[in-house]
Amino acid sequence: MGEVTFFPEGLIHYQQNLSCETATYISALNSEDPGVITVSTQFFKLPDEAVQGSLGQDEHTVKQLIDGLPAGPAEGHRTC
Protein backbone atom coordinates (compact mmCIF):
# COMPACT_ATOMS: atom_id res chain seq x y z
CA MET A 1 0.00 0.00 0.00
CA GLY A 2 2.84 2.42 0.73
CA GLU A 3 6.55 2.82 1.17
CA VAL A 4 8.84 4.59 3.61
CA THR A 5 12.35 5.65 2.68
CA PHE A 6 14.97 7.39 4.79
CA PHE A 7 17.37 9.76 3.04
CA PRO A 8 20.32 10.90 5.17
CA GLU A 9 21.15 14.60 4.87
CA GLY A 10 23.27 15.28 1.81
CA LEU A 11 22.48 11.96 0.09
CA ILE A 12 21.86 12.37 -3.62
CA HIS A 13 18.38 11.04 -4.35
CA TYR A 14 15.19 11.73 -6.26
CA GLN A 15 11.53 10.90 -6.09
CA GLN A 16 9.32 10.48 -9.12
CA ASN A 17 5.78 9.25 -9.60
CA LEU A 18 6.09 6.98 -12.65
CA SER A 19 2.38 6.28 -12.92
CA CYS A 20 -0.49 8.55 -13.86
CA GLU A 21 -2.27 7.86 -10.58
CA THR A 22 -2.17 10.46 -7.83
CA ALA A 23 0.60 9.91 -5.31
CA THR A 24 0.82 11.28 -1.77
CA TYR A 25 4.23 12.38 -0.59
CA ILE A 26 5.05 13.31 2.98
CA SER A 27 8.47 14.53 4.02
CA ALA A 28 10.04 15.64 7.27
CA LEU A 29 13.02 17.96 6.92
CA ASN A 30 15.24 19.80 9.36
CA SER A 31 14.64 23.15 7.64
CA GLU A 32 11.66 25.08 6.31
CA ASP A 33 13.38 25.40 2.94
CA PRO A 34 16.15 22.85 2.43
CA GLY A 35 16.42 23.83 -1.24
CA VAL A 36 17.02 21.67 -4.28
CA ILE A 37 20.36 20.74 -5.75
CA THR A 38 20.48 18.92 -9.06
CA VAL A 39 23.54 16.80 -9.79
CA SER A 40 23.79 17.92 -13.41
CA THR A 41 23.72 21.60 -12.49
CA GLN A 42 26.41 21.16 -9.84
CA PHE A 43 28.56 18.96 -12.11
CA PHE A 44 28.61 21.57 -14.86
CA LYS A 45 29.77 24.23 -12.37
CA LEU A 46 33.13 22.47 -12.23
CA PRO A 47 35.97 24.02 -14.26
CA ASP A 48 35.47 23.44 -18.01
CA GLU A 49 38.61 21.33 -18.27
CA ALA A 50 37.37 19.00 -15.52
CA VAL A 51 33.97 18.52 -17.17
CA GLN A 52 35.52 17.94 -20.58
CA GLY A 53 37.99 15.44 -19.17
CA SER A 54 35.34 13.62 -17.12
CA LEU A 55 33.04 13.22 -20.10
CA GLY A 56 35.76 12.75 -22.70
CA GLN A 57 34.13 15.48 -24.81
CA ASP A 58 35.35 18.66 -26.45
CA GLU A 59 34.37 22.20 -25.41
CA HIS A 60 31.66 22.52 -28.09
CA THR A 61 29.91 19.28 -27.07
CA VAL A 62 29.99 20.20 -23.37
CA LYS A 63 28.50 23.62 -24.20
CA GLN A 64 25.65 21.88 -26.08
CA LEU A 65 25.00 19.64 -23.06
CA ILE A 66 24.90 22.63 -20.71
CA ASP A 67 22.55 24.53 -23.03
CA GLY A 68 20.21 21.50 -23.06
CA LEU A 69 19.81 21.28 -19.28
CA PRO A 70 16.28 21.93 -18.01
CA ALA A 71 15.68 24.96 -15.78
CA GLY A 72 14.34 22.81 -12.95
CA PRO A 73 14.43 19.22 -11.77
CA ALA A 74 10.81 18.40 -12.72
CA GLU A 75 10.79 19.96 -16.16
CA GLY A 76 10.33 17.61 -19.07
CA HIS A 77 8.37 14.80 -17.41
CA ARG A 78 5.65 13.15 -19.45
CA THR A 79 2.08 14.12 -18.91
CA CYS A 80 -0.77 11.71 -18.44
Image (cartoon, rainbow, N blue to C red):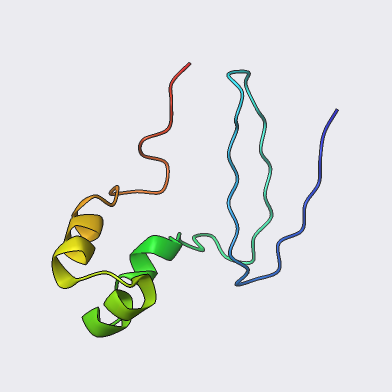
Residue at (24, 83) in percent of width and height: 49
- Would you place residue 35 above or below residue 75 in this image? below
Q: Residue furthest right?
A: 1
- Would you place residue 35 above or below residue 44 in this image? above
> Residue 30's image quarter?
bottom right
Q: In this view, does 53 lie to the left or right of 31?
A: left
Q: Is residue 32 left or right of residue 8?
A: left
Can residue 37 be seen here? Answer: no
The quadrant of the picture occupied by the N terminus is: top right
Residue at (66, 38) in percent of width and height: 25
Residue at (23, 79) in percent of width and height: 48
> Residue 28's image quarter?
bottom right
Q: In this view, does 19 lie to the left or right of 73?
A: right
Residue 8 at x, y percent in the picture: 71, 68
Can residue 72 be seen here? Answer: yes
Residue 11 at x, y percent in the picture: 63, 68
Count of numbered marks = 0
Residue 36 at x, y percent in the picture: 45, 59
In front here: 76 or 36?
A: 76
> Residue 6's image quarter?
bottom right
Q: Residue furthest left?
A: 60
In front here: 52 or 40?
A: 52
- Would you place residue 2 above or below residue 39 in this image? above
In front here: 41 or 29?
A: 41
Q: Is residue 57 left or right of residue 78?
A: left
Residue at (65, 28) in percent of width and height: 23
